[in-house]
Image (spheres, grey):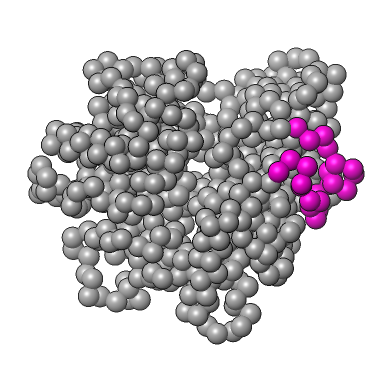
Amino acid sequence: MARSEPHEGFDLNCPLRITHTTAQRYISTRGQDDRLLFENSLFDTFTPDGGLFIPEKIPVLTPAEWQEWSRLCFQDIAFELLSIFISPAEIPPEDLRGIVRRSFGAEDTVVPPLVRLSDGLYLLELFHGPKGLPEDMELRLLGNLFEYFLARKNAGKEGKDRHHIAILHPADEPAIALALGDRRDVSIIRLQPDDVDEDDAQQMTLAASRKNIHTLVVKGSEDDCEGIIDMLFAITSRSLEPHLNLATASSISWARTLSQMVIWIHAFFALKRVLPSFDMEADKVRLVLPTRSFDIIACFLVRRMGLPVDKIVIATGEIDPLVSFWATCRYRRQVRQGDLPALPDDASTQKGGQSRQQPPNSRRGDVLVTSSFERLLWYLACEFVSIAHMGDAWNIKEAGVEVTKWLRDLVDRDAFGPVYQDITRIGRNNFVAERVALQKSNSSQRGANAAPGKVDTESLPADFRWDACEATAAGVVASQRSLSRTGINVPHISLAPVAYRKTRNGGWIGDRRMSVPANWGSSKGKEPVRSIANDWQVVRAAIAEIVERDSMRGTE
């Protein structure tokens, strides 16, 4: 699989060790490819050997450096972090500052606020961006990076000579279309199943208001759409024409991981500002996230960079292969109901366990073989093989060999393992898993207001009644369980991906919601959706046809 060419003007004859630090040179999780650029990670999605892009090395900041960062505003934190992982040979500092400024805008309207919920527990609200969606900040940065490199590649070119990318994603992710719509040299291809409910279909069309956004209705299910997307990225070369690449704006993108790292670092410093007694050299925090929200690798990497994080608390569903992996050293695509092992550091198992309720059916919600998990596997394997003291180059290759074997077994047998116990021990040193069984995905209530069958909210604050999304509720429950063991001297920061509302002692105290932008529903001048066969080759041909039309139109 050929990698994308760097921008014109990049000196391929100049050794990367001169122009790029080890954090700015990229390698593959499969261990076969190195000397890759940040630009490659943006346009190629996968490395030539089928792996994922990761930096050759993650730097560790000193306490003094973290203290310096604590005085920075959000945009400056973003600039400093991106500068670590993007060489000035690819994006000069003044250009990078411009990208950061355009991506994150005015801090009072975009920067996620940190809200105190109870002693030791704080919510990081991710819904204050311009579209009210948790992915706003990540996708704005991604869109501006695409725009920057495409403008440079296409300077002075017209028609078929221009480089063009097609962003392929499921139609139930409107944030991608909203963030990348109307970008020049970009086409948005949304795959929508024809078996969705009418209300769901209406929601999916909210974003289809821009001339470079195209919806293909596949005669099949959501899983069929995902299968086609996986096939197009895994089987084809992703080069539909010499001037066209198939790209992704999903969580696979390394640029989105960088955005999430910025947000976690910002959250830590926001906590430090409200807790002046917090000592960065002596005290630590816990970061809490549901597996279906955000990227576990972003938390892991900021901890690896030296941010004072005690552990990362993952609120998992009742059926979660990650839970089984930590406990058994084996990874299966799906854990059958009733087969869940007891988890170390899991209060619910120590106290007799909770009722086993089937969580909402969402294949993407669980960590199966996601990009974050593959990257995490590589770092766990690399730390494990480093005990041989054979040097960095050997560690990188051997970690790639291990990951390749595990994922090959996963494809062949739907499972891999057992892995060495030291590998899962390294994982447990970084992560705590809390199983939270949720039957409904839209609410969590306290005390007498709790309806039968809803989440067990023994740990939600007593004076709050919540109308919150499943992810927010799961994170709060997991945080309170963890706090019961650590005490409030270890503050917890939990994600609130979607807006919510709350009351205190029966009185209304606020609606933490963002209004839907008025232009979401506009489809004036938009071509109708197109029905298409459940066949990845047919979809691929349709994408090529659509993008050819877009590229000739010269979307402004």
Q: Nearer the viewer, residue 435 or 494?
A: 435
The front one of 78 and 447 is: 447
Residue shown at 42%/67% (left/top)? 27
* Residue 309 image-quadrant placement: bottom right
Q: Position of residue 494 (x, y in %)?
A: 66, 41
> Which residue is pictured at 55% across the width and 69% down the height?
402
Viewport quadrant of the N terminus:
bottom left
Residue 337 lies in the magenta stretch: yes
* Residue shown at 80% from the left, 30% from the top: 457
The residue closer to the viewer here, 21 or 105, is: 21
Q: Is any part of residue 138 visible from this angle?
A: yes
Magenta span has 143? no
* The residue stretch that appears in magenta: 336-357
The secondary structure making up most of the magenta span is loop
Image quarter of the C terminus: top left
- What's the residue at 59%, 69% (across, down)? 381
Q: Is residue 24 left or right of residue 324?
A: left
Let me know if residue 129 appears in the view: no
40 or 437, nearer to the observer: 437
**Residue 35 in the image: x percent, y percent?**
35, 70
Indicate whether 530 appears above or below 151: above
Image location of residue 358, percent across then percent down: 71, 32
Please determine whether, in this image, residue 331 is positioned above or below residue 165.
Answer: below
